[in-house]
Amino acid sequence: MTAAVASLADSAPSLVPEIRPETPQDRGAIEALLDHAFGPGRFAKASERVREFAPLRPDLSFCAWEAGRLVGVVRQSEIAVGGHRLIFLGPLAVDTRARRLGAGAKLVEIACAAAQAAGFGEVLLVGDPSFFGRLGFSAQATGQILMPGPIDPRRLLLKPLGLAGEGDDLVLQGAVTAP
Ligand SMILES: CC(C)(COP(=O)(O)OP(=O)(O)OC[C@H]1O[C@@H](n2cnc3c(N)ncnc32)[C@H](O)[C@@H]1OP(=O)(O)O)[C@@H](O)C(=O)NCCC(=O)NCCS
């Protein structure tokens, strides 16, 4: 990239949506966005089986708004693996017209920071390693976690949040259950 192009890229306008915790009033817009983003297969995913029993944490779930329009959402639920409580992230979706401007990454970062502030040490999700890998997630420590449905194990990803007192030696093992 030439210096001129690099300088243009640096100054390119970026989406700066307002990101707020989810409220009950947001539910209709969230459902519409998720239907649009995931299509008819939305409820067939193994992640949905988790969300059937895992309580949603609206305080750790966020909506991105632009000019009064919902352009992104990330939700988080509370789960346990082998008796250890942690957060399950998803669904994550950004409106097609607002993609590739950083909103998806920003929502994940804010959700993880909120989970950490709430005292959780890890965030688990099922997702694309090439997207979530950049955000600190990996399948390295998820080989012994059992999801309630078939998944590609390379897509079961964990991000340690660096909580004091929880070292690298924590091994998450067992079925994903309600907390
Ligand atoms: C995934 C999603 C949330 C990303 O939102 P976004 O606001 O475009 O994300 P960002 O702008 O932060 O990041 C965009 C980058 O991620 C990449 N990306 C997007 N979806 C990806 C995917 N499924 N796998 C790998 N990379 C992906 C884009 O190509 C882009 O890469 P670039 O920076 O090299 O151009 C959005 O594409 C979406 O809603 N998809 C449909 C729902 C979905 O698949 N959700 C994730 C379920 S795990």
Image (cartoon, helix red, strand yellow):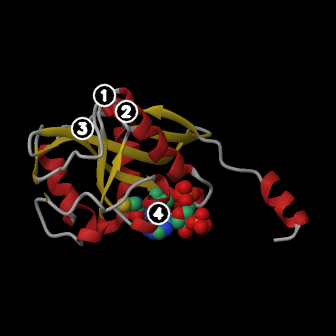
Of label 4 and label 1, which has the lower sequence position? Answer: 1
Query: For the residue labelled by badge 3, is the local secondary structure a helix, a strand or a loop?
Result: loop
Of label 2 and label 4, which has the lower sequence position? Answer: 2
Q: Is mark 4 within 8 Å of ligand 1?
A: yes
According to the picture, the residue beneath numbered tag 1 turns out to be 119
Q: Amino acid at mark 4?
A: Phe
According to the picture, the residue beneath numbered tag 2 turns out to be 116
Toward which corner of the image does residue 147 lie, by quadrant?
bottom left
According to the picture, the residue beneath numbered tag 3 turns out to be 56
Tag 2–tag 4 contact (CB < 8 Å): no
Q: Residues within 10 Å of mark 4 (few under 14, many from 20)?
A: few
Query: For the residue labelled by badge 1, is the local secondary structure a helix, a strand or a loop?
Result: loop
The residue closer to the viewer here, 13 or 34, is 13
Query: For the residue labelled by badge 4, is the local secondary structure a helix, a strand or a loop?
Result: helix
Of label 3 and label 2, which has the lower sequence position? Answer: 3
Q: Nearer the viewer, mark 2 or mark 4?
A: 2
